Image (cartoon, helix red, strand yellow):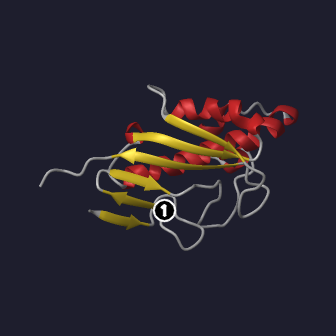
Amino acid sequence: MNMKTINAGAAPLARYASYRRVGDFIFLSGVLPIDPQSGLAIMGYADLPAEARGALGETGEFSVDAKEGPILAQSWYVLSRIRDTVEQAGGSMADVFKLVQYFRNLDHFPYYNRVRKMFFPGEPVVSTVVGINSLMPDDRMLIEIEATAYLPLAPR
């Protein structure tokens, strides 16, 4: 069995692999909305590139952006890190077929779902949604996502 462990893309925050290839499958560890280089948590629109902020619908109105911004920004950031990791493995988001999404507040799912459609505009992925009380490393984390991709090895 061909197994390869990589720590690129969605770099882990502790001692574990960001992903592992097992044959034709890529298994990603759970990804949190934290920049691993700076250690800073993604807290809202201001932590994202301008093009992402516009695509997510930043309004500039505090009452709207403060409510929707944290979950939208964290969702976008996590999915973009998953995309980067899958691309570094030689694939694309079209190769991702399964997501497990952990939410501190299940009321955030409709906001997250808007973002997920940006990354998976075609056929939806297989999805499991889990409500939990807490996410590591602290209570600012609203979402964690793990992914599985099918990426066949090139014939030899």
Q: Nearer the viewer, residue 127 or 88?
A: 127
Q: Nearer the viewer, residue 74 or 22?
A: 22
Instruction: Say whether residue 72 is left or right of residue 107.
Output: left
The image shows residue 59, relative to residue 88, as above or below, that is above
Judged from this view, the residue extending furthest toward the left is 156
The image shows residue 71, relative to residue 141, as above or below, that is above
| Disc 1 residue crowd, few under 14, some 14–19, many 20+, Cα 10 Å | many
The residue where tag 1 is placed is 18
Residue sitting at 57 percent across and 55 percent down? Answer: 30
| Residue 28 pos. (x, y %) | 47, 55
| Residue 20 pos. (x, y %) | 40, 61
The image shows residue 102, relative to residue 60, as above or below, that is below
Instruction: Say whether residue 147 is left or right of residue 77.
Output: left
Judged from this view, the residue extending furthest toward the bottom is 15
Residue 89 visible at all:
yes
| Residue 77 pos. (x, y %) | 60, 48
Residue sitting at 55 percent across and 65 percent down? Answer: 12
In which quadrant will I find the C terminus?
bottom left
Instruction: Say whether residue 69 is left or right of residue 149.
Output: right
Numbered circles on residues, count: 1
The image shows residue 121, relative to residue 35, as above or below, that is above
Instruction: Say whether residue 137 is left or right of residue 146.
Output: right
Query: Callout 1, which amino acid?
Result: Ser
Q: Nearer the viewer, residue 60 or 22?
A: 22
| Residue 44 pos. (x, y %) | 74, 46
Judged from this view, the residue extending furthest toward the front is 1
The residue tagged with tag 1: helix, strand or loop? loop
Residue sitting at 77 percent across and 42 percent down? Answer: 105
